[in-house]
Amino acid sequence: MGSDALQALVEKLAEELRRSVVLDDPLVRFICSSRHFGDEDPVRIRSLLQGRADGEVIRYVLDQGVAQWSKPGFIEGRDDLGLLTRYCVPLRVRGHLLGLLMVVSPDKTLTPRETDAIARATPAIAAQMYAEHLAAEEKESGTRELLLALIDPSPAERSAAQRRLLDGGLLPDAAHAQVTVVQPAPSQEPPAQVEVAMRGALEGFRRTRSAQGVMSVTAERAILLQLADRPMSRTERGEQATEIIEALGTFLDASVAPVLGIGGGQSGVAGARASYEQALVAARAARRMPHLKGIGDWEDLGEFAVLLQLPERSLNEALLPGPLRVLLAAPGGNRLEDTLRCFLEHAGSIPRTAEALQIHRTSLYYRLRQIQEITGLDLDNGGDRLVLHLGLRIRELLAPRGDAAV
């Protein structure tokens, strides 16, 4: 919500125009609003009641490119959204987008007197927003620096940060710590808008009913540390991650394609570094494994958690075991690959593998003999099985994915 000073400036402009005026942040989230002048629409009423606009409305407004606007313009109304046409003024200071001033104008016309009044009022509104932005930044900068120190490679830095954090009462030394990392792909979105969007998607999780946290956000990466008396369940982790990804989908263009990594639960503040490292691996899994749909959870990675700690340059076709490469190149290689994967994932059980593949056991035995002849490996040998199984896991990590590497 906006300060009293911002509210007064918005009301003053609205009274002069005799039109409704709304002030939103760069994510089209409600800050403050004037009284009505008989020009309110369903979107405005819902925003006042809910304290925010609907996601569909936010996406529509952002799709007009308002985050890149350098001068005022009209946002066309949408009857299906209950949105009347608005005159939108981007509020910038030193190139930084602070917010959007919206003046309802259903007929898409403003007189020269009205546009002049808006032009005269916006510098004061922008200056007030900038002052409040700087105050908030100063307040948060200390906790951001502490969070980065908590995950620093240096044990001395981490130890000092733990003492400052706990002695200053900024966070409790709760029993459980968990780190979430969000990383966007390179895109045409302005970096400042990406940063604001990630902050907006994460800020609601700094303080919940069960956890307290701190975060650090840049255009390249957002880090959220949460401390709680109990670990989050798999369901809670999944719901939180989904909410963050969905919010980013509202605030940012689809090309940003963010991924989210959830670190494992650790003991207290001292475990933040370990959870952070695990979250990075989980985010890398989310980028490389499309079926994860942008969300990787360390606790669910299994053997992939080990493979994904290999250097990025090592994760290529050359890492596949020779026998597996021979199998893939052989006639019917794809069918034999599927058979081998199913066989290994069912612990070498012939009945369960045949049932899963919906083939007769005789056919399964024939395919397994083919695999052994082509690869030169013995499927009754544990070491040979491990070579092939790891090869198949590596192959999953080499599937087509987004351009950005985590």
Image: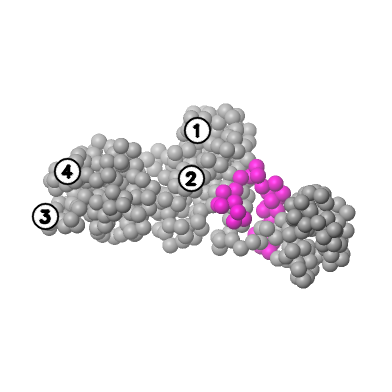
Rate crowding at label 3 as few (under 14), some (14 to 19) or many (20 or more) other CA atoms within 10 Å: few
Disc 1 to disc 4, C-alpha distance: 43 Å
Mark closer to the observer (1, 4): 4
- The image position of residue 214, as x and y in percent, is 49, 38
Question: Residue at (38%, 47%) from the top-left corner?
Answer: 55
* Residue 406, visible in the rendered structure: no
Disc 4 to disc 3, C-alpha distance: 20 Å
Q: Which residue is mark 3?
A: 113
Rate crowding at label 2 as few (under 14), some (14 to 19) or many (20 or more) other CA atoms within 10 Å: many
Rate crowding at label 1 as few (under 14), some (14 to 19) or many (20 or more) other CA atoms within 10 Å: some
Q: Which residue is mark 1?
A: 212
Question: Residue at (41%, 51%) from the top-left corner?
Answer: 251
- The image position of residue 177, as x and y in percent, is 58, 35
> Cβ–Cβ below 8 Å for labels 3 and 2?
no
Q: Quadrant of residue 137?
A: top left
In-front residue for pair 229/327: 327
- Mark 4 or mark 3, which has the lower sequence index? 4
Disc 1 to disc 2, C-alpha distance: 17 Å
Name the secondary structure under disc 3: helix
- The image position of residue 8, as x and y in percent, is 20, 39
Q: Amino acid at mark 1?
A: Gln
Which region is colored magenta?
289-316
In-front residue for pair 45/297: 45
Q: Amino acid at mark 3?
A: Arg
Q: Which residue is mark 4?
A: 38
In-front residue for pair 71/173: 71
